[in-house]
Amino acid sequence: MSPQTVFAPWEDPASKPLIRFYGVTKRFGDFTAIDNIDLDIFEREFFALLGPSGCGKTTLMRMLAGFETPTEGTIWLDGRDIGPVPPNKRATNMMFQSYALFPHLNVRDNIAFGLRREGKPKDAIAARVDEMLRLVQLQKFAGRKPHQISGGQRQRVALARCLAKAPRLLLLDEPLGALDRKLREETQFELMDIQEKTGTTFVIVTHDQEEAMTVASRVAVMDHGKLVQVATPDVIYEAPVSTYVADFIGDVNILPGRIAAQDGTRVTIDWAEGQPAIAARTRLALAPGSAAYFAIRPEKIAISAARPEGAANAVAGKVLDIAYLGNISTYHVELPGGQVIKAQSANTDRIAAREFTWEDAAWLSWTDAAGVVLDR
Amino acid sequence: MKTDFAVLTAAVLAATAAAAEDVRVYNWSDYIDEDLLTRFEEETGIDLIYDVYDSNEVLETKLLAGGSGYDVVVPTATFLQRQIAAGVYQPLDPAQLPNLENMWDVVSDRTGVYDPDGTYSVNYMWGTTGIGANPDQVAAVLGDGAPLGSLALVFDPANMEKLAECGVHFVDAAAEMFPAALTYLGLDPDSKDADDLEKAADLLEAVRPYVQKFHSSEYINALANGEICVAFGYSGDILIARDRAAEADNGVEIVYNPPKEGALMWFDQMAIPADAPNPEAAHAFLNFMMDAQNMAAASNYVYYANGNKASQEFLNEDVIGDPAIYPSAETLENLYTVTPFPARAQRVLTRLWTRVKSGT
Amino acid sequence: MRRLAVIALPYLWLLALFLVPFVIVLKISLSDTAIAIPPYTPILDLSAGWDGLRDFVADLDFENFAFLATDDLYWKAYLSSLRIAFVATVLTLLVGYPVAYAMARAEESWRPLLLMLVILPFWTSFLIRVYSWMGILSQEGYLNQLLMGLGLIDQPLTILNTNAAVYIGIVYTYLPFMILPIYATLEKLDTSLLEAAEDLGCSRMSAFWLVTVPLSVPGILAGCFLVFIPVIGEFVIPSLLGGSETLMIGKVLWEEFFSNRDWPVASAVAVILLLILIVPIVLFQRNEQKQREAGG
């Protein structure tokens, strides 16, 4: 693989996955946390498990670490069934949500903890710890105890500690949850940087869709123990497979309706009385009359005072609300039937020169390729 | 008529006054027939508050600290003597004690060593220190003809080595054990001489490895349960053990013998603290107890000999007729008393006793 | 003014319940024995004014302390008490730690019940509980009956009236004081730390030694001090369960006070005992302080 080629081993049938979940189910009593999951994760991937709390993403990760065993199915790492391997014998390391730094050990000893268990020579351990301290820029804090450093520093110690053993697979459980927004964004890039430098495979659990989009090579969206969609961030965003995914990631307008007609990839959807049918494109084969959802991101809807010429879709309404976010504004436009559609536009002019205000009549328009048609 | 009226008034007043007062008695535990307490209250109209202790040391510490609040206490004569010296007691008023005439000179002559002329105290009970044994168990380890009535049983290491198999307790009281050891060695049981005491300690140390426990009262249960076969202790305690075993009908038989080489006599004396809140009521209690029938009732209940000559005709046969309680005249000859230890000798004695018990 | 009162109150308490009794004991330890009520001299005669006070002070001396040095009994008793307290503390720790550990690992809904069971013995008189051990440990006691019934032994074991019985009594009596502080630290222990240790290559066992034990050190120390300090002066357990060879300073103190009626020497023994206890008490306080700082 040359550096120029796009990193996408999942599209190459010849590449072997590092991790393979094979029909994995996990039950806690009556509760099914993981429901018959098949999943491949490849070497050097930054793989994100995304979903609301209770969706099973943490359980999936804990099964990789060895803290839970599957009720059914097998998990393979490097072509080996790791079901019977205890956590301390796995080539995986985990960064805990709470960081789980040992409060009785200083930063250096925390980082050295895993290395010492391997019985490596002392100077080798010291060298590796120094390397890790440099990597996370904590050389000056080596002698401090965890309670004597800041939250961000603690997070970096936790990262250094699990990287020190150069694991085949690094598991990150909501690693940035405890940080404030600015620090979190910085750290996200730092994480990607480190992942690239070390070439380690990362699996990250998060409920923060932005974080998943930013760092991940692929994202798995989970719901009630099932994988709903596994794809690259852009596919997840632009081509969600269900309203659940579309709704979970980013802002979206979901317009329920019925298929009026389909001609190849072209489809028209009746969705509201008195409104023209939505023209859209889809690869799905949909029977006329069946229920369907049209999902469209607000930034893909244009707002204008006059009806735009030649627009595939255009509806009229009045501005109900404007959310000014600085760089962009979101307009909530109410249609005569009472439906509210959100449209976004970049604030290229200063606020005083804004085109619309409350109660103004406005036209919304989008192309036939701007939204997705979903059958669930 | 007028006089009668005055007497009557005085009597009524006295009765009224008495009804409002109470007397606090502090005695050894398990040491009285409780019917006597009710009878006293009925006869005198004085409320009786009865409290118990189980060591002379505890009693003494309360008395020496002052303000004990008790009207009548019953220390052992050796303790009584130095308490008198410390000014703990008030002299008795013979005018308030008509029953003094009932007392037995055999006993009061001997208690005179501690309290000359009985100025401060009258005898309640007395007994000896000796050997309690379970004849069956002793015979099992020593064979028939073991010297149950001799100090050799407990001071000859050859005997003790074998007796250790069935268990031996000594009473944890240096003032009892040293005189016995001195007697066995042929020395003066009352010796306060440091060398003599040292010799007695050596003797005790020689048999110490075979003694299971030194305790002030535990040998009562241990003997009665058959846990031990020999105890050197107070006659009364060993007789209690004998009776308990008989009541339990557990096949354990206990006999008590004062050592034939000579046995130490002990006396528990009734006395009135100098700061007694109600000395009149205290005298009334003493006089009540010195009544021949009352004293006999007490002895019949606790199986101890008392110092009351007049009471003897009311004693049950199993009390007056038991030589373990009322020794024969010739044994009586052989009984001795000891004088209390002065402070310095007491320290030597305690120290030696600690050495015997703990090896330190 | 009110703040002053609030601050003064605990000090008054300390003054009344510790300092005043201690000064009295100290004063007696500097006096001489006498056949009197109370059995020592001199007595402070306040009616004589300054002269009385001067005479009083002039009569005080340290001869009772000097006396303690002349007899090896005393330092041997102190040493023996320290040794017994040390061994008993270690034994209590060995029994108490697993119990505390099991409690902290038990399901949360069970913990209040388990805690209550630990405290339950306090609902019965301490004396009765020690007495009942006499019934268990004696030659004819339940333990021997059980062991002989099971055929494990032919001859009854002599346990009562030996040091072994003293240790059993101490471990039994002081166990809650060991369990509760250890439980408190273990219960707070974040289980993700153990998972992290396992994740980094520890077996369950080594995670216990490298993480659980070091993190429960404050509880272990608190428990050990809470057992060690009172056991040094323990009197009841050795006198009821111990044999004559059980030498403890509490018993020596009792004998000085009751058998010898030597209140001054007894007080001197008590003063020295207190001085010995100050060391572990200060260490204990420091441990508590450190824990508070770490917690805050």
Image: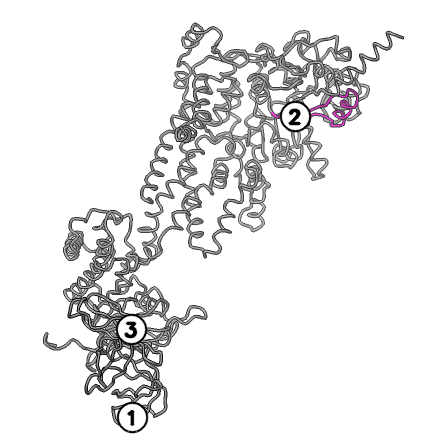
1 and 3 marks in contact (CB < 8 Å)? no
Disc 2: which chain? B
Q: Chain of mark 1?
A: A
Quarter-of-image position of residue B180: top right
- The one of B62 and A158 positioned closer to us in this rendering: A158
Q: Secondary structure at mark 3?
A: loop
Instruction: Residue at the far bottom: name it.
Output: A263
Q: Nearer the viewer, mark 3 or mark 2?
A: 3
Q: Label 2: which residue?
A: B51
Crowding at label 2, few (<14), some or many (≥20) Cα neighbours within 10 Å? Answer: few
Q: Judging from the image, what secondary structure is the residue with disc 2 in?
A: strand
Q: Which residue is mark 1?
A: A262
Q: Disc 3 designates what residue?
A: A359
Question: Label 1 sits on what residue type?
Answer: Gln
Mark 3 is surrounded, within 10 Å at the Cα level, by few (under 14), some (14 to 19) or many (20 or more) other residues, namely few
Q: Is residue A252 visible?
A: no
Residue B211 falls in which quadrant of the image? top right
Nearest to the observer: residue B102 or residue B356: B102
Mark 3 belongs to chain:
A
On the image, the x and y values in percent for residue C27 come to 44, 16
Report the amino acid beneath label 2: Asp
Seen in the picture, residue A86 relative to A319 is either above or below; the reply is above
Task: Decide: is B65 above or below A177.
Answer: above
Quadrant location of the C terminus of chain B in the rendered image: top left
Between the residue at mark 1 and the residue at mark 3, the CA separation in whole angstroms equals 36 Å
